[in-house]
Image (spheres, rainbow, N blue to C red):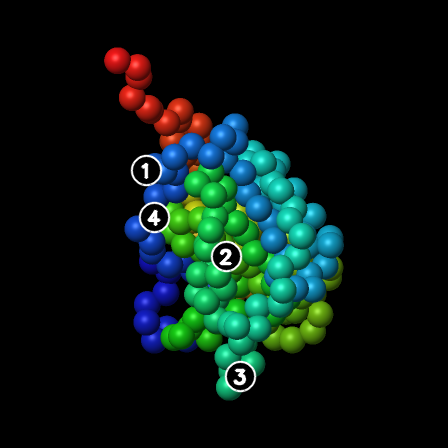
Amino acid sequence: MGYAAGRQAGGLGTIPTNRVIGMDEQACGLPALSVEVIPLGKVSQTAVAVAAGNVQALLRLEALVMPSWPEPDYALLPLRGQYDAEAILARLAQGTPACRLRLGLTAHDLCLSFVSHVYGQAQLGGCAAVVSLHRLQFFSEGGAAPRALALERLAKITLHEMAHLLALTHCHRPGCVMRSVTDLEELDRLAAEPCPACQARIASRKRLLEQASSRVPEFPGPG
Ligand SMILES: [Zn+2]
Ligand SMILES: [Zn+2]
């Protein structure tokens, strides 16, 4: 879902995936679904704290701030001067434990093959999401955005992409953070949280995943 091929607009996207976290996997022993917040190279500590804080406070998922991974040089598209969001998601998804989700944060500008830029990208119902801080610091028409506004945008995009990981699709209700947006002005008009219907979907999906990841594996009994 997200953007049709050929559409030259930025926004918040998803990549469909067949993986359903935890559903058919052995319990990993952790009590609840948690989110690894991973700086990809040099990323402001405040931005990491804001992303982790929103995951923890608004999604009520345990946020674990992880040590930085290297800069995502493997995803650099030299002719575009941007980074391939799908390549970053593929790398983030490698080896993710069944009861964890991964949120990568990057200071670099992200794009997809047929999309000029994205603010964030996530595997729908998968385990990896990435958010770029690059464009959030500016206004579309140019000029630096206030730092508080940039961080508010980061909080919204983080929630949006994390909800995609919880298998939520886009919402059409006015102001909901799960609306599909194509520019920063649209993003700025959204609330900083999901609408009640999306919140209910998030709660139900979390319950399902946590039940699956805390399930005790069955072994044949004696005799
Ligand atoms: Zn989206
Ligand atoms: Zn909604």
Q: Earlier in the sequence, mark 3 or mark 2?
A: 3
Residue shown at 41% from the left, 54% from the top: 123
Instruction: State the residue position of label 4.
Output: 19
Instruction: Mark yes or no: residue 48 visible.
Output: yes
Q: Secondary structure at mark 4?
A: loop
- Taking the spot 40% from the left edge, 75% from the top edge, the residue there is 113
Task: Give residue 78's mark.
Answer: 3
User: Mark 2 — residue?
Assistant: 92
Measured in 3D between alpha carbons, the distance from the residue under mark 3 to the one under mark 4, in whole angstroms, is 31 Å
Q: Residues within 10 Å of mark 1 (few under 14, many from 20)?
A: few
Q: Marks 4 and 2, how far apart in space?
A: 14 Å
**Residue 189 in the image: above or below residue 65:** below
Spot the residue most to the left: 223
Label 2 Cα crowd, 10 Å radius (few <14 / some 14-19 / many 20+): many
Disc 3 residue type (three-letter): Pro
Marks 4 and 1, Cα distance to the nearest angstrom?
Answer: 10 Å
Residue at image coords 48%, 61%: 91
Report the quarter where the C terminus lies.
top left
Judged from this view, the residue extending furthest toward the top is 223
Q: Secondary structure at mark 2?
A: helix
- Distance between mark 2 and mark 1 Cα atoms: 20 Å
Where residue 109 sits, quadrant-wise, is: bottom right
The residue labelled by disc 1 is 24
Amino acid, disc 2: Leu
Residue in the image at 40% along x and 49% along y: 126
Q: Is mark 4 within 8 Å of ligand 1?
A: no
Q: Are marks 3 and 1 in contact (CB under 8 Å)?
A: no
| Between 174 and 37, the one nearer to me in the picture | 37
Whether disc 3's CB lies below 8 Å from ligand 1 is answered no
